Image: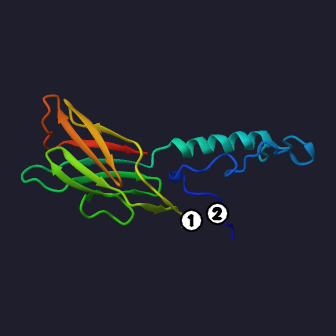
Amino acid sequence: MTAINGYPAWVRASDHTTYGGDLNKKNWQSQGVVDARTDVDAAALCRLAEDLSACSRTCPFGVISWTCVDTPTPGVPLITAVNLMTGIAIVDYSGDDPPTGFPSAARNGTGDVTFTFAASYSDAYGVSGAFTPRHALPGSQTAAAYATAVISGQTVRVRLMTYTETGVANASGTLMVL
């Protein structure tokens, strides 16, 4: 059995050494690549390790698409797609009834939704790591509207507004969280 090294990517604590990089890494017996189809040179492995650590530091934790349910009567947002580092929701779900491990969503008003994330998530190997939203990049999928986001602890509040500063009814949006 292999013991997992390092933290999950969303902790943003891994560097090139986590992925096998080392400035003193050398090829075995100072030989270069013997078979380019199967061998990896020490320099190439170090480059790969740094590139992988850069990806884990900068990739989003998740991307969420949703639709506000305002008519015929205001209701809970419908989550239409979720792609997290921990998993993908393949079916739509109501914001107040998320599958295990996925964020919930609550309606605050017309075009106004709050997403709540867990304080910790586990990866496929069962290694858990704390998660706190640091950056939120919202987008409107509704014409003539713009989106804003405010982070507060484990929540991200997104507002979809018209250019006359009113909430957009039945709006759709996307949220990228890092």
Question: Is the residue marked by circle 1 packed among few (<14), some (14-19), or many (20+) residues within 10 Å?
Answer: few
- Amino acid residing under circle 1: Tyr
Between 17 and 174, the residue placed more toward the observer is 17
Q: Nearer the viewer, residue 78 or 22?
A: 22
Left or right of 63 on screen, residue 144: left
Residue 63 visible in the displayed image = yes
> As shown in the figure, which amino acid type bears the numbered disc 2?
Ile
Which residue lies most toward the front here? 153
In the picture provided, is 11 more to the left or to the right than 67? right
The residue under label 1 is 125
Secondary element at image label 1: loop
- Residue identified by numbered label 2: 4
Q: Residue at x 33, y 46 (%)?
A: 151
Query: What residue sits 90% from the left and 42% below the top?
Result: 31
Q: Can residue 41 be seen by looking at this rendering?
A: no
Residue nearest the observer in this picture, 137 or 29: 137
The answer to which image quadrant residue 34 occupies is top right
Q: Position of residue 2 (x, y in %)?
A: 69, 67
Picture residue at 62% right of the left edge, 57% below the top: 6
The quadrant where residue 105 appears = bottom left
Residue at image location 66% in from the left, 41% down from the top: 50
Quadrant of image for the N terminus: bottom right
Q: Earlier in the sequence, mark 1 or mark 2?
A: 2
The answer to whether mark 1 and mark 2 are in CB contact below 8 A is yes
Q: Position of residue 83 (x, y in %)?
A: 41, 51
Q: Label 1, label 2: how many angstroms apart (C-alpha)?
A: 8 Å
Residue farthest along the bottom direction in this orientation: 1
**For mark 2, does the 10 Å Cα neighbourhood hold few (<14), some (14 to 19), or many (20 or more) residues?**
few
Q: Which type of secondary structure does the marked residue at label 2 adopt?
A: loop
* Residue 40 in the figure: left or right of residue 16: right
